[in-house]
Amino acid sequence: MFVAAWLSFVTGAKSVTPLPGEFESARRWAEDAFARDPAGRGTCGVSFRYHDVPSLEFLKTWQHDARQTDADATRAVREIVHRDPATGLEVRIELTVFKDWPAVEWVAHFRNTTNVPTPIIEGIAAMDGVLPVTSPDATTTLHWARGGVASFDDFAPQETLMRAKATLHLQPGGGRSSSQVMPYFNLEGAGNGVVAAIGWTGEWAADFNCDPKGQVTFKAGLARTRLFLEPGETIRTPRMMLVFYSGDRWRGQNLLRQFILAHHRPQLGGKPMVAPVTCGNWGATSAEVHLDNIARIIEHRLPIDYYWIDAEWYGKGGWPDNVGNWTVKADLYPQGFSPLSEALRKSGRDLMLWFEPERVHKGTQWHREHPEWLLGPRGDDYLFNLGDAAARNHLTEFMTAMITSSGLGCYRQDFNFEPLPYWRAADPPGREGITEIRYIEGLYAYWDALLARFPNLMIDNCASGGRRLDFEATSRATPYWRSDGPRDPIAHQCHSQGLLAWLPLSATSQDRAGDDYEFRSSMCSSLCLNWWVAGDVPARKIPATFPFDWARKTLEQYLSYRDDYYGDYYPLTRYSPSPDVWMAYQLDRPEQGRGLVVVLRRPDSPYQSARFALRGVEPGGRYRVTALDGGAVTERTGLELITTGIDVVVGTRPGSALFVYQRQ
C-alpha cells in the first residue's frame, strides 16, 4: 500500500509549490483506481474485453500480485500483475506515484505466457475511471485545445461544460498524436481539478461522460484494438498521466508545465535541455553560401546555437519526391557537411540537419532495395515500417553514420503524411491495431537508441509542424517548428497563447529582421530565426545591409529573460484572433522572485494604453518593475501588482512592450 512519506519531500520554494492536499489526492486516486479490495473489485484504471466480457467482471477471479519499490528520490513505483489461470494472459501495470509533484503515471503491458495464441482482446483502454473533480452544481468545465493542422487556429483553447449526461469524444485522426486535437485535458471543478494527458504518438481516442450526479468518467487509449497475442508476445498501451490540483484552472496548467519540465524534459549531456536559438536555411543552398553566412554569424557575434539545414540537400530533384534517396547532393556539398559542422563547432555552435526517414517515395533507393520494410503504397508514398526490427536497426545504423560523419548536434525528424491508413491496411485478420502498436513501440526504441549513442544529441520533432506533441514524444524530441500555419504575427501570438498552457518548450519562425513587434509575437522558450531566408528556396549570402546590431542586441536581450519561459504561465488577455485587440501574457518564477510580461498591441487596435493585473507575485513583497524599452523603473508592492496592475502605453500600431519584475 502506498504511504504518504513523500509529503515532506518538497523543500524550498518552486513554481506553483505543490500542496499536501494535492499529493494526498494523487495518492488516494492511485490507491483506489488500482486496488484489489476485499470485495474483489479488481483493477479499474485499465479496461478491456476478453471472451467478449468486460474486464471489470472477471479480473477479480484472476491471479493477482503487487509489489512496490522506490525507483529514486522522486518516484514510488508499484507493479501490479493480473494473470488469467485459464489462458495465461498476463496484464502488468507499471504505476508511478511521484513524490515531488502531485502526479501519477502508468502504462500496461499485455503478455501471452503460453505457447498457443490467446483469445481475442479488444477495446483496450489505458484509462477507464472517474476523475475525482467536484462542483456544487454538478457542472465541471473541460479545458482542451485544438491540434496542429497548419492553420491560424492551431492550439486554440476550447471549453466544454460537463453537465449531467454530457458526452465528448476526441481523437486526432490520421495517426499523429496532436493533429486535430491535443492529447492534454484539464477538468476543472469548484476549487479543484485534474489534468490528464495521453502519452501515445499514434491514434488515441478519449471519451468523457458525465453521469446525472456530475461525475465525469474518462476513458482513453488506443483508438482501435481487436487482436489475439501470439505465444510469448507482449504489447503495451499508451502511457497515462494525471496531475491533481486545488484552486483554479491555471494552477493546474502550471503544475502540469512544471511536472513536464521536471520529468519529461529531454536531457542534453546528462543535464536538462535548455531550448536553443536556431537559424533556418533551405537545404538546396550551396555549401559556399552556408559557409559565408556562418562566417558572418560568427563575425557579428550572433548568439545562435544551431545552424539549421532543412530539406532538399539529398538525392536528385525536389524534396517531396525524393525522400528515400539519402545521398548528399555532391554539386551542393562536395565535401559533405563536415566543413560546415567543423566551422560551427570551432565557434561553439552546432549543425542541425533535416530528415524524413518514415516516408519513402516510389522509385527511390530505399524503395528499390528494401521493399520488404515498407507499408503501402498510398499513391506514390510508402511508410517505412519502424515496427519491423530489421528495418529499425537499419535506420538506426544509417542515422548513426550520418550523425557521426556530418558532425550533427541536432537531428531534425519530420513526418509529413498520415500513417493510420497504412497501419490499418497492414493488420492481419484478427489483429486489428497490432501494426500501429509495433510501429509506435519501434519509434520510441529508435529515438532511445540514438539518444543512448549520442548523449549530446538534440532531436527536433516536426511532423508537419506540431502534430506529434504527446508527452511520450516530447520527452525525447522537442518541436522547434510547432506549426506549418500562417507565418503571421497574430497567428504566432495565438499559437503561443494556446500551446503555452500545456507545453513549456516549443518554437516558431522569426521572419522579419528589424521588426520588434514580429520578433516579440514569435517569442517562446526557443527561437527559430529565418531572417535572410525567403521560404523553401536556396538562401543567398547575408547582405551587407542586414541589421546585425539590431539582431545581436535583440537576441542578447531575449537571452536575458529566456529562462522566464520555464516559469508559470498566465494569459493576461482573452484568446482572440482579432487584429483590433491587445494580447498580453505573464511568465512568473516565484523561486527567483522575478518574471516577464509581454504586451502586444495589434495593428487595428484603437487603444494606446492598457492596464494588466499580474498573478503569482507575493502580496506583501516589493517589486522593481523595469520597462525594457527605455529602461524606466518603478517600485510596486505585490498587492498593487495584483489589484491595480501595471499601466502600459504603446503608441504605435502594431507595437509591443516588455517588462521584467524583480522582488526586492
Image: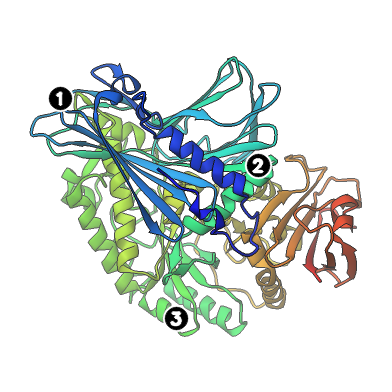
At x 39%, y 38%, the residue is: 418
Q: Residue at x 59, y 63 (%)?
A: 11
Nearest-to-viewer mark from 3 and 2: 2
* Residue 173 shows in the view: yes
Residue ID for mark 3: 345
Q: Residue 184 appears at what percent x and percent y?
A: 53, 40
Say which residue label 1 marks: 86
Residue farthest to the left? Answer: 115
Nearer the observer, 301 or 523 = 523
Residue 73 against residue 376 in the figure, above or below: below
Task: Please tell me which of labels 1 and 3 falls first in the chain.
Answer: 1
Quadrant of res 212: top right
- The crowding category of the residue bearing disc 3, from other C-alpha atoms within 10 Å (few below 14, some 14 to 19, many at least 20), is some
As shown in the figure, which amino acid type bears the numbered disc 1? Ala
Q: Position of residue 605 (x, y in %)?
A: 86, 46
For marks 1 and 2, give the CA distance: 45 Å
Disc 3 residue type? Arg
Q: CA distance from mark 3 to mark 2?
A: 48 Å
* Protein image colouring: rainbow
Instruction: Please report whichever mark, 1 or 2, sits nearer to the chain's N-terminal start.
Output: 1
**Pointer 2 residue:** 246
Kind of residue indicated by mark 2: Ser
Rendered location of residue 638, percent (x, y): 84, 59
